[in-house]
Amino acid sequence: MEKSRDNQNEPVDGDVTTLDRILPPGNCRVVSVTATGSFRRRLLALGFVPGTLIESVRVAPLGDPIEYRIKGYYLSLRKEDARFISVKREADQA
């Protein structure tokens, strides 16, 4: 039986997880975008394309949204939206 993607709190495949699980300070690279339709197009237009480096910068006081640095600009995403972006953790750069 195929494993359901409904539980977004578990890693997708080994080192691969979802962006909402990368808490500051943390770095990761985009593996894929699982969203569909216009939301997928919007994420891709914002720069969430495979191979892109993302830095998790800070979390809002109540825990949502999370601010990320991607391609030289800062963007805040709600956790419910960030879960559609599969990423692979990177070693933190000192």
Image (spheres, rainbow, N blue to C red):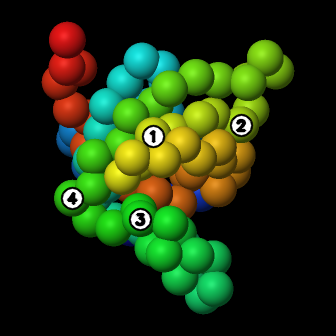
Query: How many residues crowd mark 2 within 10 Å: few (<14), some (14–19), many (20+)?
Result: some
Mark identifier at residue 65: 2
Query: How many residues crowd mark 4 within 10 Å: few (<14), some (14–19), many (20+)?
Result: few
Contact? badges 1 and 2 (CB < 8 Å) = no
Mark 1 secondary-structure assignment: strand
- Viewport quadrant of the N terminus: bottom left
Mark 2 secondary-structure assignment: loop
Which residue is found at the position 53% from the left and 82% from the top?
A: 41
Q: Residue furthest top?
A: 94
Contact? badges 1 and 4 (CB < 8 Å) = no
Q: Can residue 82 be seen in this view?
A: yes
Mark 3 secondary-structure assignment: loop
Identified by mark 4, the residue type is Gly
Q: Which comes before the other along the chain, label 4 or label 2?
A: 4
User: On the image, numbered disc 4 is attached to which residue?
Assistant: 51
> Along the line of sight, which residue is nearer the eye, 46 or 64?
46
